[in-house]
Image (tube, rainbow, N blue to C red):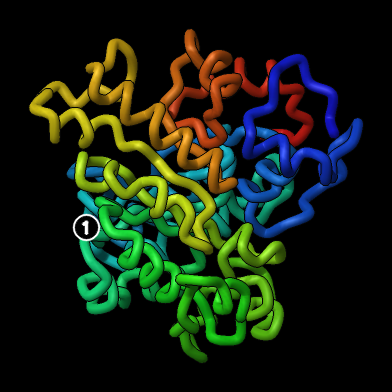
């Protein structure tokens, strides 16, 4: 285990014993930089790609955005398709720009990219019908997908199924477990070029981590309203997930708070929701995502945050110093 001056959160402590960095960083060990960091016991920090109504709207603009973010200070880019255009050609152009501008300062071909889709985890049937969104996003060479409004654990199981190839069998024999994946041959062509792999190599690692220890895909869910909160323990326990988020802005909106706060001071209901989702994440051994600011990043990671939202480079630099980060950006 890497020696650190802070109490390693529950999720990270279990992984830190297998740390691969040592005293000096010797280059990438994985395609997905974010997974590599989590496996080493390090929190990760993200920034934003396409986001809301201000996102670029042409292929050329999106390519340039990707190119400009290839050397980002962040470990992960959260790309919004929930509120930005659901345009997979724009996403592919963004990924091509990242590749063109790369590698990252850490030597990875691109930063890790997770896409938030306009797909709601309300019930398994709606996720099954709209699972094509998950498959199209992954075929663009991204590294993860974030599911909104994860109210129903069965819907989350369907979400995981849509993200997997049938060749991967982990979790299929669990009680209340997963069904066989449904991604198909031909979905790999563009994605494996972004990842720099052969077809066989891509099929081998294009699976959900940590369920598959060799997997390079991170699946996450948003527990962002009281309906989802009621089932959050069962949801966090679904095999195939890598992280859960408490979704403070939408959680607050659900309780009637209109300011859309993700940082303190938060309403009592949102604070309680954050604590419950964190406990569910720790109990299931998945990462916990929440906002941090420069003045609370240390207390946040000591309190259990593994994936730091908020897009603050200053907070990331403070947090990395505190945890003894070795990997460059």
Q: Residue at x 69, y 26 (%)?
A: 8
Q: Is residue 284 above or below residue 329?
A: below
Identify the image quadrant of the N terminus: top right
What is the total number of numbered labels drawn onto the structure image? 1
What residue occupies the far front of the structure in this picture? Answer: 175
Q: Residue at x 60, y 53 (%)?
A: 110
Residue 247 falls in which quadrant of the image?
Answer: top left
Q: Is residue 168 above or below residue 42?
A: below
> At which x and y percent is residue 4?
78, 21
What residue occupies the far bottom of the structure in this picture? Answer: 185
> At which x and y percent is residue 92?
41, 66
Label 1 neighbour load within 10 Å: few <14, some 14-19, many 20+ = some
Q: Can the viewer see residue 97 in this picture?
A: no
Residue 107 vs residue 150: left or right? right
Residue 290 falls in which quadrant of the image?
Answer: top left
What residue occupies the far right of the structure in this picture? Answer: 23
Identify the image quadrant of the C terminus: top right
> At which x and y percent is residue 191?
53, 73
- Secondary structure under tag 1 reads loop
> At which x and y percent is residue 160?
44, 68
Residue 325 vs residue 21: left or right? left
Residue annotated with mark 1: 85
Q: Residue at x 70, y 62 (%)?
A: 213
> Nearest the camera: 68 or 217?
217
Q: Residue at x 89, y 36 (%)?
A: 22
């Amino acid at each position: 285990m890497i020696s650190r001056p802070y109490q390693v959160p529950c999720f990270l402590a279990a992984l830190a014993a297998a740390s691969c960095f040592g005293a000096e960083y010797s280059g990438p060990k994985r395609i997905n930089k974010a997974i590599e960091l989590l496996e080493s016991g390090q929190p990760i920090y993200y920034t934003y790609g396409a986001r809301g109504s201000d996102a670029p709207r042409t292929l050329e603009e999106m390519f340039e955005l990707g190119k400009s973010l290839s050397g980002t200070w962040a470990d992960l880019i959260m790309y919004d398709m929930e509120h930005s255009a659901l345009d997979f050609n724009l996403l592919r152009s963004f990924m091509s720009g990242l590749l063109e501008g790369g590698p990252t300062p850490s030597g990875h071909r691109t930063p890790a990219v997770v896409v938030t889709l306009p797909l709601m985890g309300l019930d398994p049937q709606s996720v099954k019908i709209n699972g094509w969104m998950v498959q199209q996003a992954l075929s663009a060479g991204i590294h993860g997908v974030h599911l909104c409004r994860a109210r129903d654990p069965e819907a989350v199981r369907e979400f995981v199924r849509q993200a997997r190839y049938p060749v991967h069998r982990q979790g299929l024999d669990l009680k209340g477990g997963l069904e066989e994946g449904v991604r198909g041959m031909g979905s790999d062509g563009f994605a494996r070029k972004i990842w720099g792999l052969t077809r066989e190599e891509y099929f081998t690692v294009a699976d959900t981590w940590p369920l598959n220890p060799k997997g390079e895909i991170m699946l996450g869910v948003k527990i962002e309203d009281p309906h989802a909160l009621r089932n959050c323990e069962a949801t966090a326990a679904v095999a195939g997930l890598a992280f859960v988020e408490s979704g403070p802005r939408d959680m607050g909106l659900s309780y009637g708070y209109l300011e859309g706060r993700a940082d303190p001071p938060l309403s009592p209901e949102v604070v309680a929701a954050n604590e419950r989702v964190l406990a569910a994440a720790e109990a299931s051994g998945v990462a916990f995502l929440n906002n941090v600011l420069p003045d609370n990043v240390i207390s946040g990671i000591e309190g259990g945050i593994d994936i730091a939202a908020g897009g603050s480079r200053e907070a990331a630099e403070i947090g990395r110093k505190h945890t003894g980060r070795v990997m460059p950006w």
